[in-house]
Amino acid sequence: MSLVEDIRERARHSVLLRMLLMGFLILVLQIPILQIDGTVSERELTRQAAIDDVTRTWGGHQDIVGPVLSIPYVIRSTDSKGQVTARTVHAHFLSGGAVSAAELKAW
């Protein structure tokens, strides 16, 4: 047997060489895992920023108006030429006695 064949045979059965190769592969395969983790973290931050923006924009003080009574009526007027024009307008009335308070919590 030659020296090269002897080294190949020892390397083929070497536990230390196999362990080093496995360690190297584990380290190399951590690179894509770290990239995926970075992408997930970035998307979580973007999601939280969007939630905060919508909450800040739409989550402020809101007024809820109760029932409105709307009554149409006609206003007639005569211009300088004697033409009569009619215009329909609406009178709006709110109920004055209803008072309510509510508190909403986001989940």
Image (cartoon, grey):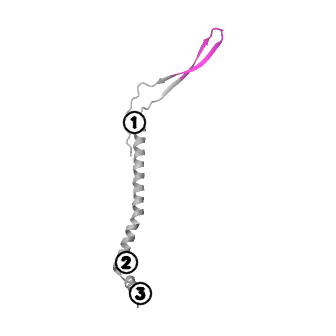
The image shows residue 59 at horizontal and vertical percentages of: 40, 38
Closer to viewer: mark 3 or mark 1: 3
Amino acid type assigned to the residue bearing label 2 in the image: Arg
Q: Are marks 2 and 1 in contact (CB under 8 Å)?
A: no
Residue 5 shows which numbered tag? 3
State the separation of the CA atoms marked 3 and 1: 79 Å
Residue at x-position 63% and y-position 15%: 85
Q: Nearer the viewer, residue 37 or 31?
A: 31
Residue 60 shows which numbered tag? 1
Farthest residue in the bottom direction? 1
On screen, residue 10 versus residue 72, left or right, reads left
Mark 3 nearby-residue class (10 Å; few <14, some 14–19, many ≥20):
few
Closer to viewer: mark 2 or mark 1: 2
Label located before the other in sequence (2 or 1): 2
Which residue has dot 2 on it?
Answer: 18
Q: Secondary structure at mark 3?
A: helix
The residues colored magenta run: 71-91
The quarter of the picture where residue 86 lies is top right
Quadrant where the N terminus lies? bottom left
**Vertically, is 84 above or below 16?**
above
Q: Secondary structure at mark 1?
A: loop
Amino acid type assigned to the residue bearing label 3 in the image: Glu
On screen, residue 57 versus residue 70, left or right, reads left
State the separation of the CA atoms marked 3 and 2: 18 Å
Residue at x-position 39% and y-position 39%: 56
Farthest residue in the left direction? 16
Q: Secondary structure at mark 2?
A: helix
Q: Nearer the viewer, residue 75 or 14?
A: 14
Residue at x-position 40% and y-position 89%: 2
**Vertically, is 79 above or below 14?**
above
